[in-house]
Amino acid sequence: MVEQLCGIIAIILGIWEIYSVHKTFSEVKRHGNENTSGFLPLALWSGIVVSLAFIIIGICLILKLW
């Protein structure tokens, strides 16, 4: 039961992270200029990787594959 609960929480965190990355990307696309950090694409990419990891781990926990 605790594994399934942790899996659901991990999936929710992954979805929230994808939403945050999308919101940040849209904001920078609209208001970005030459003062925007050059490391922002790397930060967005790592946010997507982390969110996918959370979702995969959550699914594995729910299905008791881990």
Image (cartoon, rainbow, N blue to C red):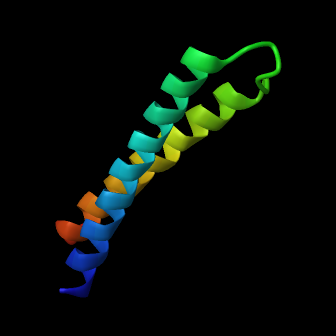
Q: Measuring 55% from the left and 16% from the top, which residue is drawn there? A: 30
On the image, which quarter does residue 37 sit in? top right
Q: Position of residue 38 (x, y in %)?
A: 79, 23
Q: Position of residue 60 (x, y in %)?
A: 27, 62
Which residue is most to the bottom?
Answer: 1
Q: Measuring 33% from the left and 53% from the top, which residue is drawn there? A: 56
Q: Quadrant of the C terminus?
A: bottom left
Q: Quadrant of the N terminus?
A: bottom left
Q: Is residue 66 visible?
A: no
On the image, which quarter does residue 35 sit in? top right
Q: Is residue 28 visible?
A: yes
Q: Is residue 59 left or right of residue 17?
A: left
Q: Measuring 49% from the left and 37% from the top, which residue is drawn there? A: 21
> Please, is residue 62 above or below residue 57 in the view?
below
Q: Position of residue 12 (x, y in %)?
A: 31, 59
Q: Is residue 15 left or right of residue 53?
A: left
Q: Measuring 62% from the left and 19% from the top, which residue is drawn there? A: 31
